[in-house]
Amino acid sequence: MAFDVLRVGELARFEFTEEEVKKFDGHIKEMLRMISIIPEVLETEAMVANKVRLSDLREDVPQGSWDSFDVLANAPKKKSGFFVV
Amino acid sequence: MELSELTAKELSQMLRKRTCSASEILESVLQQIQEKESDIGAYITLTEDLAKKQAQKVDEKLAKGVELAELAGIPIAVKDVICTKGILTTAGSKILENFVPQYNATVFNKVLAANMVVVGKANLDEFAMGTTCESSALRFTKNPRDLTRVPGGSSGGSAAAVAGNEAILALGSDTGGSVRLPAAFCGVVGLRPTYGRVSRYGVIPLASSFDQVGPMGKTVGDVRMLFNAIAGEDPKDMTTIPNKKFEKSFDIKKLTLGIYKEQFNEHVDPEISASVMKMVESFKEHGATIKEISVPYSEYFLPLYQIILTIEAASNLARHDGIRYGHRTQEFKDVEELYCKTRSEGFGPEPKRRIILGTFLSSAEFGGAYRKKAFYWMQKIAEAYDNAFKECDLLISPMSCSHAFKVGELVDPIKIYALDLCAFGASLASIPALALPCGLDSSNLPIGTQIIGPKYSEKFLFDVGEFYEAHCKT
């Protein structure tokens, strides 16, 4: 897939100025060239390296929660005990 | 000599002998801040009132004969990426400019439990993304050793606070060299611990597979004391690990030091290489065995680090959307525009650049291929270090290719990323590395070296570092 700064910006929820488009396009393409030297690996090899060890996970036990006042303390906009979207 | 110029170890002993008080130590540090902070700019937020109360409490307890932790009463700077309940925590970003956490990071709770005195929140590159500290959106920090130069990053404020005697100790965080590079540039000591030795709970994340909180101080002994205070398993961070015993104990006559071949390359300033080699020679004179050791795949370090870092940063920073905390744009027509405008206004160029690359590399079209490939090679690199440590106890290398740059000297982001070339290996292999000063160059600027060890070898690294400080340093 070819890199398109505007499309990726949309996915990442950004609006860019024309100057930013030019700057980021150049930088990211240069970084993609740098990254391209990493050799490909077989899917089976990659699977072994990426395997999650379930034994490493703790028991899923419910724990204490936060007071809604604390949760909302930093909300830039809130109403009746809820975040405003 | 002023109290602020002393080490944590010396001050701790003086406090116990009652030859000075915690309030006097703090007063000396605050005096330095008053005199130098407008030039250095190490802090985003100063917590003078809190510090005075904490110091007074320590003095009261000591007067009553209460037994306190060895770091009680020692002033500390805390990187502004570590959540502190009721104290502004900005990550150096406009998007969190007014964020006041409702909880403490585990490391900060440990600092409080040790009765340390919190002087303030130290400046950093925005969201810890950078190597010069110049990407902070909120403060401009300069190197106390030369005010025309950068302190290094991303924990530049932490390093500058210690180097400028504006704190005795500091907490930084190291994703790909962010404790070690500023330590080298500012001439202080800093540790990247084994991944999992220090809790990341409450530390604003950059790349969760690499992030580690690291202690900084004037000497190896001070960094050891702070590490001992903050390390440990934490049920709130499932990646933390219990303290596993490292088998070897330090004896200079039995030490095999590996000269890290790939990191003495043509990019490294010859003055730096020469200084590190002089350090190696001094170990040899005291009976250590010296070997040249090669660790393969070094050409992959920077690209692999960038793949994992940007993918994880894009995911971690997706939470900043103007709903739950942080900056929120004023005018928008729908929720999509709210997200886009909030993020575009709140993030600076460095986070944007990394989020874009990470979003692209993790987009559905690739089906996770970049991430899978990167983790495969990360495992190969860890194995390569394991093999290297079969031939030597520790590896030694320069910490950076150059001394501290002039402010504004570096503008090309790729060149800035490459500054940490000597640092990426330890991050990719999840192993500890100690950065410590090993002299001054012809411009009178600090030169930093790095000693890298196997997993859980922190005590061994400290023993070697302290031996160097006591017996080899000229």
Image (tube, coloured by chain):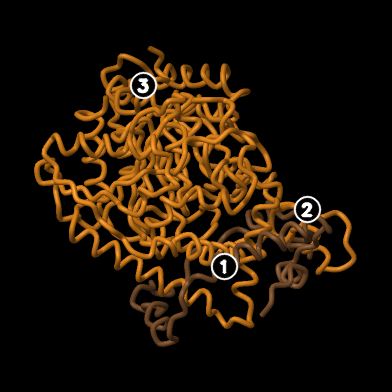
Chain colours: A brown, B orange
Q: Is residue B318 visible?
A: no
Could you confirm whether marks 2 and 3 are on the same chain? yes
Look at mark 3 in the image and give the residue it sits on: B6
Camera-nearest label, 1 or 3: 1
- Residue drawn 51% across and 42% down? B155
Look at mark 1 in the image and give the residue it sits on: B311
Say left or right for B409 vs A25. left
Q: Earlier in the sequence, mark 2 or mark 3?
A: 3
The location of residue B86, given as percent across then percent down, is 59, 42
Camera-nearest label, 2 or 1: 1
Q: Residues within 10 Å of mark 1 (few under 14, many from 20)?
A: many
The location of residue B177, given as percent across then percent down, is 45, 49
Look at mark 2 in the image and give the residue it sits on: B345
Q: Name the chain under label 1.
A: B
- Residue drawn 78% across and 69% down? A6
Q: Are marks 2 and 1 in contact (CB under 8 Å)?
A: no
Residue B266, above or below B239: above
